[in-house]
Amino acid sequence: MFLADVVDASAALAATRSRKAKIATLAELVNQAGPAELPAVVAFLTGQPTQGRIGTGWRTLAELGAAPAEESALTVAEVDAALGEVAGTSGSGSAKRRAETLHALFAAATEEEQRFLFRLLTGELRHGALEGVMIDAIAAAAEVPGEAVRRAFMISGQLPVTAVAAVTGGAEALAGFRLALGRPLRPMLASPAESLEEALAEHDSAIVEYKMDGARIQVHRQGDEVHVYTRTLREITKNVGELVELVRGLPCDSVVLDGETLALTDDGRPRPFQETMSRFGSTREEQVRELLLRPYFFDCLHLDGVDLLDAPLRERNAALHKVAGEHLIPGESVPADPAGLLEAALEAGHEGVMVKSLDSVYAAGRRGRAWLKVKPVHTLDLVVLAAEWGHGRRTGYLSNLHLGARDPDGGPPIMVGKTFKGLTDELLAWQTKTFPELEVRRDDWTVYLRPELVVEIELDGAQVSSRYPGGLALRFARVLRYRPDKDAADADTIDAVRATLKG
């Protein structure tokens, strides 16, 4: 398959808002690709090379200076091989060799192909937000149920691998995916509920648990071997020794647990989220001593040789109680006083509660409403699109943020508002230092960024407005914190913003 075929498909995707049309375009391309090139085709059209980040920045690509080819001749396999060579180059003189490989690649590409490759390598090609559409396209191409593809993707964590299995082996191959100890699973996520009463009314039987302001973790243990992963499947085992030792001490031989971890103050209240996240990138002994992490587990996906992914939550919860002991997250099945549990969670410094159906199986992503989160303060996770230079005491700092919601059909983030409220001096300094590293262009007042950073925004709902492309504007938006544990594919959708519209 030629790169031009992928570029043409990308242009067709960008030209339509129809999810059905996007799925048809992708399914046709998946069917045309051979098994060897299919992983690269799927990876490219979900916004990243098969190698992931290859360590090439915007400035490096901008300075290549390669004149475009007049005719299209590059194949997908050739592009994938070149990017693999770049990713694997290291040692003395590696920067020069990487630049030479990239120059040769871009010189073999037409102008349109160069633009595609530039966006692909700088993270500007939808940044993986096409995953949901691609899953449906793979299902259509392979003529298998979408849920079978989603389940296999949850277990493998790799959409290209899942695509090859679906196309070459169908439903039987997808059903063959099994949880593997030491290979992280994509996490199950929650949808928001307007109130505790609404959440409870949606389920015949449910468990109500604290919703903590911590960092999501997934732990795997087999014998004495322990691995700890973040919600984005990044391994942090070497940075969280206290969690490793704790999991080694649990009464089991093998286990996979889902939970939260956070650092606590001396009186047992949660420390700020940023302090917990700082531990994931540090092994300094003094910081470890000052910020010991405490885990709170809320799901058990495997215990002593038995996989529990397809078991209902009531069974997984029973296994969790057997193994987690004092490290269970606070909660009750069908509590006599759910409002009292919510009040207790808030008084303890947490965000609210989770209401989970005891009949639900474990499924990645916001699929349905099996898990519902109830928070008195309304927040959205949005993508930072740009920042404006400040005025007055903020002169010289990048301040006013342009905010975007995720397009559920895989397009670029949709701008829904701006805010400079809630930015501390520390955050202003951090933004001013960090944002130029993500810069794609600028004018006299604004620095425009690759859509990678996710920020949590507190707001008083949304209102209809023609000022922004989404047809909405945020009301009284205020920055709460950045979310380094999330990427743009985890941001809230434009539909989630619409759900906050004031009457």
Image (spheres, helix red, strand yellow):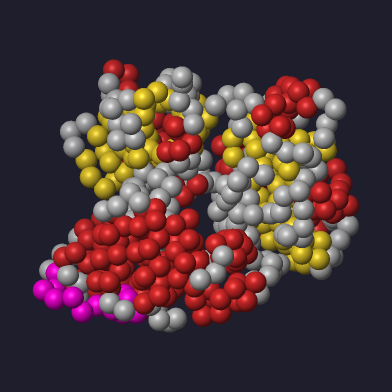
Residue 433 location (% of width, % of height): 36, 39
Which quarter of the figure has residue 353? top right
Q: Is there any visible trace of residue 230 in the rendered image?
A: no
Start and end of the magenta stretch? 68-79
Which quarter of the figure has residue 109? bottom left
Rendered position, 78 above or below 287: below
Q: Nearer the viewer, residue 87 or 136?
A: 136
Residue depicted at 57% across the width and 47% down the height: 366
Does 163 sit left or right of 433 as displayed? right
Q: Is there any visible trace of residue 449 in the rendered image?
A: yes
Q: Nearer the viewer, residue 419 or 417?
A: 417
Magenta stretch: dominant SS?
A: loop
Residue 42 location (% of width, % of height): 42, 68
Residue depicted at 37% across the width and 70% down the height: 28
Rendered position, 438 above or below 58: above
Residue depicted at 27% across the width and 71% down the height: 5
Residue 90 location (% of width, % of height): 40, 72
Magenta-colored stretch includes residue 281: no
